[in-house]
Image (tube, grey):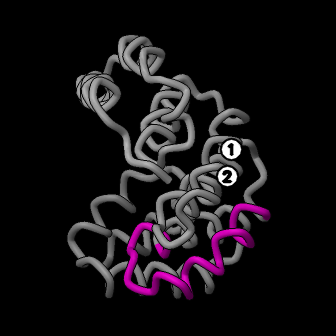
Amino acid sequence: MKPLEPPDTHFLSAAQGWVMLGNPTEALAELARISTAGDDCPEVLEIRWQIEAAFKHWNHCLELATRLLEANPDQPTGWIHRSFSMHEMKRTAEAKERLLPAAQKFPKDSTITYNLACYCCQLGQLDEARHWLARAVAASNLDRIRRMALADPDLQPMRQEIENW
């Protein structure tokens, strides 16, 4: 795949800036200025996913994440976004199954193992959720994962246990 060139790189940077500022509408306007040659560029797909996620357009997010995964299967982002989109669409069992291969492919990625813990918890698979949380801690650090877990509604069934870490 050919990398983006100016002025498309400028439009992408502007879109990324708008997303960071919490303005997905302006970010979308900047992406609309990118030539069609950039439509399948992983960086464009990634920022498009972030924008659509801000709008909670999960069907479109799933489509974008699938394209991102196809364009760049050796990066964890597409795997993570695809499963997160499914989870938000109430397809949590499928989200878990689709993310499991990524845990083998990227064993040190704490986002993958953390998300698997969330999905297992929501599916009532608490022992498996504990396993994935332990892996997330090993790949990151206890304080970071604990803070995230205490604030995460997906891990509510384990809240008391997590408070005692």
The quarter holding residue 111 reads bottom left
> Is residue 111 located in the magenta-colored stretch of the structure?
yes
The kind of residue tagged 1 is Leu
Where is 52 relative to 124, above or below? above
Residue pictured at 45% horizontal, 18% vertical:
28
Q: Position of residue 37 (x, y in %)?
A: 52, 33
Image quarter hosting the C terminus: bottom left
The quarter holding residue 9 reads top left
Residue pictured at 42% horizontal, 11% vertical:
29
Residue designated by label 1? 62
The kind of residue tagged 2 is Thr
Determine which of the numbered discs, if any, sits on residue 66 in the image. Answer: 2
Kind of element beneath mark 2: helix
Q: Position of residue 38 (x, y in %)?
A: 48, 35
Residue pictured at 48% horizontal, 44% vertical:
41
Q: Main secondary structure of the magenta part?
A: helix
> Is residue 163 located in the magenta-colored stretch of the structure?
no
User: Which region is colored magenta?
Assistant: 94-113
